[in-house]
Image (spheres, rainbow, N blue to C red):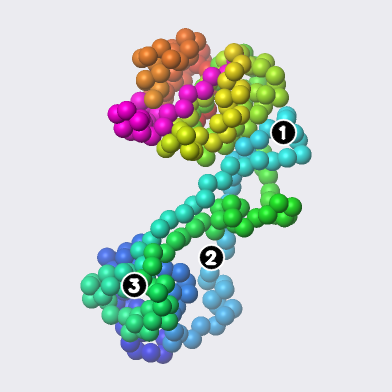
């Protein structure tokens, strides 16, 4: 870095753990960081590309069944989205810690009204899949085998526990149950969500399958309208057992397996 003031500000930042945490929590973009701290740096482009981390692949659990359709793969994606403080507030917090950034005022003026507005961070891959991908567009994907499967014996009782997009593999199992036309006699799904009237994903499919005698589901939302009780799977499952809502064949199994004890007589416990 050619400018002494830039160099001093950057060194002061990296040596102050609390100040560095402010910068990290503020989620500055690489452009913001270079504009504020490294305008005078002389960086070889090839060296810069070499030190940048390569983008990692994003694994998603398949939420469909090959038994239903071997030519299609379904995934369940939640848009990663966070609101962050305005850049102007981040600069003020750093200044309060004694970190003086010579180019801050010029850069904030350059941003105009945007400097004082909250900034939104979105996940790179989830934003691409949820907001930027259109029907008919081709994407490069790779699929690999998984050991997370249904038991081969159709008479084995199955208890599935999942919340949010953790429902993805169980949605695949639900589709498989449909393809098997009810050959599994004892299957139950416990699903947790924040608001059952808004984010109970795949609700129609699950309720439709629940009309059969071979499958039951229980959805527990984060807050009960009456008592605002915060849910946990342990509490939700305990509630099902105490009130007798859970059907008899599962009561004994739930008590034993949910505590982490797995015996030969237990059903398959599948949870995320």
Work out how far the residue at label 1 is from the one at label 2, CA to CA, in angstroms: 35 Å
Name the residue located 59 percent from the left edge and 13 percent from the top edge.
Answer: 213
Residue placed furthest toward the top: 248
Q: CA distance from mark 3 to mark 2?
A: 28 Å
Above-or-below relation of 23 to 81: below
Please report the bounds of the magenta region as a residue range. Answer: 214-235
Badge 2: how crowded within 10 Å, few (<14), some, or many (20+)? few
Marks 1 and 2 close (CB-CB < 8 Å): no
Question: Looking at the image, which residue is at 37% across and 14% down?
Answer: 243
> Which residue is the site of mark 3?
88
Label 3 or label 2, whichever lies nearer to me, is: 3
Please check the rendered image and state whether residue 223 is part of the magenta-colored stretch, yes or no. yes
Mark 1 element type = loop
Q: In this figure, which residue is indicated by the disc labeled 2?
A: 53
On whether residue 217 falls in the magenta region, the answer is: yes
Q: Is residue 209 above or below residue 13?
A: above
- Under circle 3, the secondary element is helix
Res 66 label: 1
Q: Is residue 227 above or below residue 242?
A: below
Q: Are marks 1 and 3 in contact (CB under 8 Å)?
A: no
Dot 2: element? loop
The mark that comes first in sequence, 1 or 3, is 1
**Residue 123: image x %, image y %?**
51, 56
Where's residue 193, x and y in %?
45, 35
> Which callout, 3 or 2, points at the residue further toward the start of the chain?
2
């Amino acid at each position: 870095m050619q400018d002494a003031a830039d160099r001093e500000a950057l060194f002061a930042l990296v040596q102050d753990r609390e100040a560095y945490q402010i910068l990290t929590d503020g989620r500055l973009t690489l452009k913001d960081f270079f504009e504020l701290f490294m305008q005078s740096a002389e960086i070889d482009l090839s060296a810069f590309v070499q030190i940048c981390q390569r983008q990692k692949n994003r694994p998603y659990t398949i939420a469909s069944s090959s038994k239903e359709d071997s030519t299609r793969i379904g995934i369940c994606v939640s848009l990663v989205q966070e609101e962050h403080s305005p850049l102007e507030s981040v600069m003020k917090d750093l200044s309060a810690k004694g970190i003086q950034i010579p180019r801050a005022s010029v850069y904030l003026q350059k941003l105009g009204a945007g400097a004082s507005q909250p900034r939104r961070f979105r996940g790179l891959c989830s934003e691409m899949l949820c907001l930027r991908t259109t029907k008919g567009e081709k994407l490069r994907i790779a699929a690999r085998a998984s050991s997370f499967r249904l038991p081969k014996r159709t008479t084995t009782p199955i208890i599935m526990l999942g919340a949010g997009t953790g429902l993805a593999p169980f949605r695949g199992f639900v589709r498989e149950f449909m393809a098997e036309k009810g050959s599994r006699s004892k299957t139950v799904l416990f699903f947790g969500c924040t608001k059952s009237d808004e984010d109970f994903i795949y609700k129609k499919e699950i309720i439709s399958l629940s009309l059969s005698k071979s499958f039951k589901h229980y959805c527990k939302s984060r807050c009960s309208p009456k008592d605002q009780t915060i849910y946990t799977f342990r509490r939700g499952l305990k509630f099902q057992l105490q009130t007798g809502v859970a059907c008899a064949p599962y009561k004994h199994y739930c008590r034993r397996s949910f505590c982490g004890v797995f015996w030969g007589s237990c059903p398959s416990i599948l949870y995320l």
